[in-house]
Amino acid sequence: MQQNVGGDNHGTMIGIQNVNEIRRLRGTPLPKDWIEDRLAAYLADETLTNTLNGILTAHRVAVLHGPPGTGRYSTALHTLTRQPTVTAVRQVRREPNDPVDLEGLIDEDTGWILDLRDEEEILRPGFGLHLTADVTDHLRATRSFVIVVTHTDIWARVAGEATELARPITPPTGLNVLRAHLTRPLPVLGDPEQWLADDKIIAAMEDARPATAADWARIIRAAADLNSASTEPKPVSELVDSVVQSANNWRRTLRSWHTQHTVSAHRNYLLAAAVLDGAPAETVYDAHITLGAALQDTSLPARGQQGPGIIELTHTIGAELADDDHIRFHHPGYAEAIVDYFWVDRPHHVAAFTHWTAELATTLPPDLGKPLAERVTQWATRYTLAKQSFTVLRTIATDWAKTPHLHGPAQELLVAAAVGPTDGKRAREQYLTWAKAPDTGDPSKRGHTPTALKRALAGALAQLAPAYPQIALKRLAELAVHTTDDAVADAVGDALTQLWDHTALQDSVRTILSSWFTSSQSHYVAAARRAFLHLAARTTPDDLPLLLKDTVTRSWTLAGWRCALDGPVTAPLQSAVSTWLDAALARPELKPTVLTAFTDAVFRSDTDRTYLAPRYLHLNQVAFAWQPAATEIQPSERSLLRDALVWALTTADPAVPHHDPNPQ
């Protein structure tokens, strides 16, 4: 289900978009409603579809190539959904430029899409032979199919190895695609032919690719929706110019407006109204005053009825003051274009503006603050992807991460900018740079990364890991080693704990934590300790400690306990040890395993049986916090278990004479 949060994000919240994209990239079966939505306005080329069907029947693999924006992915989706034996469509899980091994696809009755559309993708010699010689029989045995989608230039490097598998895509005309998008998805636009017959629309669609036509359709629908909500609706002929301007980001219109309106109060009101599009007039008016202060405008405050009021200001910026006293722009994409113009025109004010939005989102009522954060998040994401500049992204994510109310949106922003296989590549590279940079508390200090941003980045990487596991783990490792901040180390530990829930990543997490348990870098150790104790405190549905159940990796668990006991006694350590003691108390058969684990943990390692007194002292302290010493006529079961642990630890010390006090 889509959630409507305004016209600019096409009806879907950023967090939901992130989740859907990550599920697609990790190879989860594509939801039926997602496929139906993706293909709602798809114009099938029956000749191409029949050709691809024939190739799939003969070889089980087909290659579809063409330039960006021509509908390659949708064509593959359309073709696979029409294979009678296919019960699920999935994307092949693969990180950028990883080797391709299609024989590893074991799911039956599945239509697979191998997405190689990134223009920097490298197909190594032999890839085409792999498709023709190695894959057909395997896919036939699983009753499955694969369609590879890629760029023509990329495919050309290996095209001679599999000419019988590949076909170029010939997209429909832009005008026909626009017609489909205006008529097929519900609700149908009032009278689409009025738009389609306009000379400016026809000219714009002359060489437009399907992706461009789809963007124009969204703008037209937004213009129609805004017009219908206006107190003075206009005919289609008067709306076309606004659609054309929106497609060009309103840059010329806004340049003219700013040239004619040099008064700061007007410009601040314009910017505040854009950020709060649809908010009450009083809220917008108050916000433009605080914005002026944030930008250090020196204009004198108005007294009495001096200066323009709400009605005059709203008219000046070209917005509408509706009957409900809310201020709205009735041009598609205009509010976003205003903010975009400001980011480009006033880069030296981006930090102050971002701090102002964070304060505004926090102080406004939730029905205004939450949409504001959502709106700025999506705008910043599109700005970052379009410009491939990370100044705005860095500033917003840092400022928001400092505010508990906006820490989640800060992570969503970082995920949204990096999740796309192609568009997000530069962001993923930038995150590695940020992770490696030294800590700073000063966001203006270039070459360093603010600790608030590092904390948010750790959470964002945990969300990205199902789609990009190795990329995420690499950046989390760099975050851990390039920080001296305890909160960043904790954030990395929390992120690794989240990754544990993905079974496919557990071996990688173990490997990383193993190298960190005994690292000479203190914050590697701190991150490992944090992650391990989170895991040690977790239980299965039947209250069995998660790591106690995992007998296969006992040596790894023991190394984790040793690392944990080398540190100070903390709440996480108390919680983890208590969880294991509670399990031994509830299930007596577990008592030997628990006592042996804690006893072995006091030794330096499996091969070095040196007894380390600090570990003994820490375990004693935790045990007596779990069950404090008290005068008891008859020792309780908890006291007996505590004493059994203390005795086991004492007798483990080779320097202590052994004599069993028989606490039982």
Image: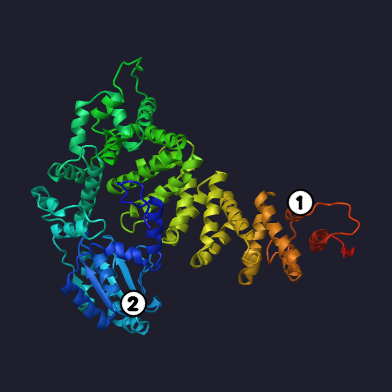
| Label of residue 174 in the image | none
Q: Residue furthest left?
A: 199
Give whichever of 73, 288 is nearer the camera. Answer: 288
Name the image quarter holding residue 33. Answer: bottom left
Question: Is residue 488 in view from this perspective?
Answer: yes
Comes first in the chain, label 1 or label 2: 2
**Residue 257 x, y percent position in the rendering:** 20, 31
Up-down relation of residue 348 to residue 469 (above or below):
above
Quarter occupied by the N terminus = bottom left
Quarter occupied by the C terminus = bottom right
Render colour scheme: rainbow
Q: Is residue 510 shown left or right of residue 161?
A: right
Secondary element at image label 1: helix
Up-down relation of residue 294 to residue 464 (above or below):
above
Mark 1 — residue?
625
Name the image quarter holding residue 517. Answer: bottom right
Task: Compute the Cα span from label 1 to label 2.
Answer: 58 Å
- Neighbour class for label 1 at 10 Å: few (<14), some, many (≥20)? few
Q: Is residue 469 shown left or right of residue 311?
A: right
Give whichever of 609, 469 is nearer the camera. Answer: 469
**Residue 224 x, y percent position in the rendering:** 22, 47
Give whichever of 84, 390 is nearer the camera. Answer: 84
**Residue 18 x, y percent position in the rendering:** 39, 55
Q: Nearer the viewer, mark 1 or mark 2?
A: 2
Secondary element at image label 2: loop
Mark 2 — residue?
86
**Residue 660 x, y percent position in the rendering:** 88, 65
Q: Amino acid at mark 2?
A: Val
